Amino acid sequence: MTTYFNKRTGDRVEMDGQSARLDALDNWTRLNDDQSNPPVVDDGILSRPSLAGPRAEQGPGQVLVETTPPAPDEVPTLDTPPVELTPIAQAPADEPRQPAKSGSKADWQAYARTRAQDSAEEAEIDGLTRDELAARYGGGS
């Protein structure tokens, strides 16, 4: 196992064998197995304010998600605050996902229960067919 460290971004990569590409790049350093990460170097380009801020620690097999993703039409600038990353285990709960139109009746019933406005509407759910559930709670998709 070979470990490389990017001295400008702080990224650490482990791979089987060596990488001729990373060996050729001056910002990547090969580390020994017991060697800790060297300090990150401020190069004046990659260390912009928009990239600054604490980095979330990513454990093995853990996925990081954007806690506050930017709006779809937002173009980041140097004045834009950094995007916070949160381990997926701590990510805020999203709205329940709508099942596929061809999803099972049980999936549609479970989804409909999350969307029901009151107990009377929730009681009707068991008597509806899958197509009726999709028409009522599917939003036309």
Image (tube, rainbow, N blue to C red):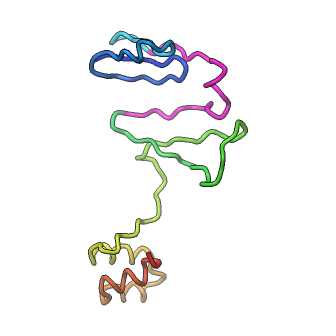
x 42%, y 34%: residue: 58
In the orientation shown, which residue stands out farthest toward the right? 79
Q: Which residues are magenta?
A: 37-59
Q: Is residue 91 magenta?
A: no
Q: Is residue 38 magenta?
A: yes
Residue 42 appears at what percent x and percent y? 62, 18
Which residue is at the front of the view, 43 or 127?
43
Can you say which quadrant of the picture contains the N terminus?
Answer: top left
Which residue is at the front of the view, 28 or 118?
28
Residue 132: name its quadrant: bottom left
Q: Is residue 2 above or below residue 130?
A: above
Can you say which quadrant of the picture contains the C terminus?
Answer: bottom left
x 70%, y 36%: residue: 78
x 73%, y 39%: residue: 79
Query: Horizontally, is 12 left or right of 52 in the view?
Result: left
Query: Horizontally, is 6 left or right of 15 in the view?
Result: right
Q: Is residue 91 above or below residue 94?
A: above
Residue 115 appears at what percent x and percent y? 45, 76
x 52%, y 41%: residue: 85
* Marker count (numbered): 0
Secondary structure of the magenta portion, mostly? loop
Residue 134 appears at what percent x and percent y? 37, 80
Q: Is residue 6 above or below residue 62?
A: above
Residue 73 appears at what percent x and percent y? 64, 54
Which residue is at the front of the view, 24 or 134?
24
